[in-house]
Amino acid sequence: MRFYLDHAATTEVRAVAREAMQPYLGDTFANPSGVHTAAQRAKNAMEEARERAAALLGVSRPLEIVFTGGGTEADNLAVAGAALADGRRGGVVTTAIEHEAVLETATFLRTLGCPVTVVGVDSKGSVDPAQVAAVTDQETAVVSVMAANNELGTIEPVREIADAVRAENDRALVHTDAVQAFVSEAITVESTGADLVALAAHKFGGPKGVGLLYVRDGITLEPVIHGGGQELGRRSGTHNVAGIVGMVAAMEEAVAMRSRFRSEVGGARDRFEDELRRAVPDVEVNGDLDHRLVQHSHVRIPGIANETLLIRLDQAGVAAAAGSACQSGAIEISHVLEALGFTPEAAGECVRFSFGWGQTVTDGELAAKAVAGVVEALR
Amino acid sequence: MTRALVAMSGGVDSSVAAALMLEAGYDVVGVTLKQWEGPGGEMPVAGCCTVGDAEDARRAAAQLDVPYYVLDYVDEFRTEVVDRFGASYAAGKTPNPCIECNRRVRFKALLERTDELGCDVLVTGHHARIRTDADGSHHLLKAVDGAKDQSYVLHMLDQATLGRIRLPVGEMPKSEVRERAAALGLRTAAKPDSQDLCFVGHGNYRTFIRDHFPDVATPGPIVDMEGEVVGAHDGAVDFTIGQRKGLGVTFGEPRYVVDVDAPSATVTIGRKEDLEVGGCLVDDVSFIAGSPPADPKVEVKVRYRATPVAGSIRLSDGRWEVSFDRPQRAIAPGQSAVFYRGDEVLGGGTIATVVR
């Protein structure tokens, strides 16, 4: 039996998305920026997708949705676009557990002269709103805090953070990377209180290479990709019409089925952890267990190097992940676990299992047994 | 035995080694050791052991439809190979880091993990052969392709290790290895053999040493055989015994580096005949069979590219001493002296000092 427990890395493109994309890979292939009828048809499909995406995020103005080439691009546009808007070198406040798409953008902005402050987290990976507010000042252009961490699954109090930030500086923009959270958490503009929200299609059953950024009406962002001026100049480049349509189809289904996802996939994860704890009593489950994405299980198995464990799990048919793989494929020490205060040794014993659509409590139980079998063989 | 862990460098030999193990009926798991990294933790982009090589290995594994992983050996490689390399240069010697890598990383740290990675044997693309007698004792032999023979860098292997490793490409000429690779459509088929030290890449290894081990670059005098100062140098690291070029001093006839004394940073130069030595003392000696041969007459190879020469070995005050039948030139401490009898490797060790 094979268990794909790496849905946090990416998901299968759902049938509804694949079907929705087909016409735009075939007959309706035209560039939506054109004048002719064929272009208008593609443009119409894209704008309809924009309206539907806006509705799903609780947004009244569809043009507040900017289509991008994925989550990383959406984060770059949000953070760099806000910090550099109007020719400024605005301040950036973010956290130590953000995705590299945010952290590396912040590092780049620092080289351009933007003041950057990175706030730490507690041992569960939770961000304290008061701490974020305390480092927000009049120079702060953007505060970026993820809706949920992509490794641990810890859910961050973005709404409270947004309120606390605005109490300090009501001109500071609040960005949230909701890439990992959207599939299982009721993410809307209202629920996050954010001015900028990034999503990536492939985390919720859409295709890779397409995402979106919600940009609150009235906000001017400095574009990070320059060219033909598509997306009102906010993201140049020929539109990925099929990808956009596929993303929104997957997004609609994800929202419609979210409560079922939470009970079914969450049930699979819970059974997995129960069974794993029973079979491997010294397993440690990381993250904030009271505020955690239902599909994530991030564990430390003391005494077993994750590099070895992942290879043996792969041989046993279990696909899991640890830290982030670098370009060569070697496992890098996770900056997230470092931020939580893990020693390199402890971090090197952590593995992430992430569940997804179609997986049941039976899968959770069998997968845990497979993991326990490998752990036993290695001990 | 069913599953083979194949150390894949991204070159043609290890790619074909993986294919040969598949043909022999093994399940194959390909791995590349990440041994060296840039300041940001990235794999080097130039030279050997690069992202490109890992990618070649990964693609070859995919073509063979076998799982492939990159294993992080950066810490082990730095302490066990690169730091020793620098320390050896600092001691005025001429180290062979490939031998330390084989001794301490590839056939030790990686071999020790073969079990936990779910594998039964470890396979590399080295050109050498293993023969096993009916009684279970193992012999290490030169490769079928003498020009590509790598048995020199495997002289430290012991019986237990030889029982757990396989060297399938040593059984065929290099031309056949390339033909096999081409027939399998492996993208590594025409890839040139790597000549560089993996962690130095295409750069000059002396520049690498100066950058990473600045203490070894102490300036000092160049003296002749009588001890007269005839010049000065910027660091003993720039000199290897037998070296003729780059001495910075000229005489009527060629001069060669005869000795490098690290503590005093003194480089001694002399005539060609001054390079001749009768023997050498060898440390860290091991024998493939587990014990020394009864007959002390052996052939000795003193550098990777040297031709073995006749000599004899004996234990003298607890140290192994090699006596050459005829004087030999340019014996460099730090290199390995490997003992052969015909095609068979008997053992070897690291040259400590020459005996004039």
Image: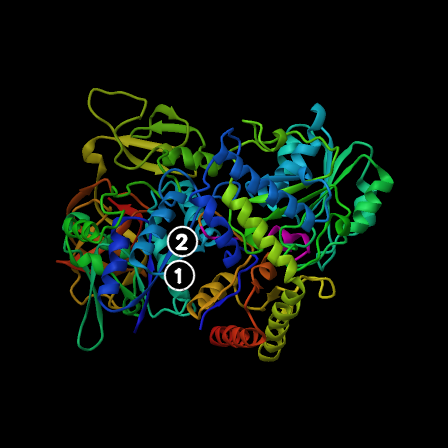
Tag in front: 1 or 2: 2
Residue occupying image coordinates x 37% and y 64%: B111
Name which residue type carries label 1. Leu
Give me the chain letter of mark 1.
Answer: B
Residue B174 appears anywhere in the view? yes
Q: Which mark is residue B33?
A: 2
- Residue under circle 1? B110
| Relative side of A145 to B249, left or right | right
Q: Is residue A288 above or below residue B33?
A: below
- Asked whether B224 or A312 is in front, the reply is A312
Residue B85 spot, x, y in % from top left:
40, 45
Tags 1 and 2 both on a single chain: yes
Q: Is residue B349 above or below residue B292?
A: above
Residue A2 spot, x, y in % from top left:
45, 70
Residue A135, picture quadrant: top right
Residue B195, picture quadrant: top left
- Asked whether A138 or A1 is in front, the reply is A1
Q: Is residue B197 magenta?
A: no
Cβ atoms at labels 1 and 2 below 8 Å apart: yes
Magenta span: A329-342
Image quarter where the N terminus of chain A lies is bottom left
| Secondary structure under the numbered disc 1 in the rendered image | helix
Residue occupying image coordinates x 31% and y 52%: B60
For this orientation, the residue located farthest to the front is A37
Residue occupying image coordinates x 65% and y 32%: A109
**Which one is earlier in the sequence, the residue at label 1 or at label 2?**
2
Determine crowd level at label 1: few under 14, some 14-19, many 20+ residues with C-alpha closer than 10 A.
Answer: some
Residue A151 appears anywhere in the view? no
Name which residue type carries label 2. Leu
Q: Which mark is residue A258?
A: none
